[in-house]
Amino acid sequence: MVALTIPSIGRRAENTSPPSAAAEVMAGCSLRLIEQSLTARYSDWIAEALDEIQGCFLITDPGIAGHPIVFASRGFLAMSGYSREEVLGRNGRMFQGPATNRRSVLEIREAIREERTLQISLLNYRKDGTPHWILFHIFPVFGVDDGRVAHFVAVQVPISRQSRSLSEARCGGARGRLFGACRNEVRSDCDLGCNLAADLFVDVDNRGLEAEESREASEQEKERASDAANSILSALTHCSKLTGRVVSSKRCRVAGIPTLSSSLIISLGRIKQSFVLNTVTPLFQERQKLVLESTSRISCTECIWQGM
């Protein structure tokens, strides 16, 4: 199995103070949940089985507060530049940046809320800050026993420069027909300026990618994403049969058992983790003390009224 470590998120380097007891309990609880997220449903061999699959993908668990990443493939780690320890336990937002299209992010959130498959072009960032376009293919994995979403799988296929070049060629043909009546020398000057601008946007080291509005994936890249998704689902389904907690790409409704949406499961996970945190904080203990004192005063008041 792969050793999991939850990195401290949001802490500054100069902060050398030891973590509080509440933070340690919180981290320990999250670590256990992440470790058990895959093994409890898919057996202890699931990490090795997933590592055999070629491609870039992540697996997340909506049942844990923060909807964290519980598995990252070797291909994804090589593409992003992160180590597995830096990714596990984090939310997928860590790969977004200033030029990531907010509308695309909202579409992904909506797909998660509605528990459906989505393919969309997305501008993400590597660890070194380099932007890169990917075809983001996300789909839910349902538990057959209760019909709830067990995990989300996010396949990521890099979109090549050729995909954008083909798109630009189609747009270029339309522009040529539109301005066909212009004089040749004016059109030549315009084409030269447009080509220079396009070269800046698709530079070899990806500088200038932020200036692009979108990049369309080719049919081959879409097929690669679908093939990888099928391979991952096949591995998850096979391993889930070893534990008897079988999963499927489609929801199987069980009579008499209501299903909970992913958004509600995420909210319940936050409440659960918040309860674990509150039980060990001094503030919670002080509140308990105040409640006990108030209860004692009320009891004394009732005794006085009864005596009268």
Image: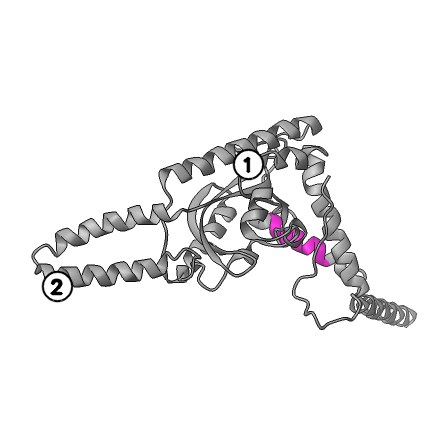
Under tag 2, what secondary structure?
Answer: helix
Confirm whether residue 255 shows in the render. no
Above or below residue 99? Residue 218 is above
Range shown magenta: 265-274
Of tags 2 and 1, the one toward the viewer is 2
Q: Single out the residue that lies furthest toward the right.
A: 307
Quadrant showing the C terminus: bottom right
Q: Of residues 61 and 96, which is closer to you in this image?
A: 96
Image location (x, y in percent) of residue 81: 58, 53
204 lies left or right of 71 = left
Q: Which residue is drawn at 51% across and 35% down?
A: 228
- Which disc, if any, is residue 54? 1
- Which disc, if any, is residue 200? none
Question: How far, Cα to Cα, is label 2 from label 1?
Answer: 50 Å
Q: Residues within 10 Å of mark 1 (few under 14, many from 20)?
A: some
Give the amino acid at mark 1.
Answer: Gln
Q: Residue at x 12, y 63 (%)?
A: 186
- Which disc, if any, is residue 186? 2
Is residue 267 found inside the magenta-colored segment of the image?
A: yes
Give the amino acid at mark 2.
Answer: Val
60 lies left or right of 191 = right
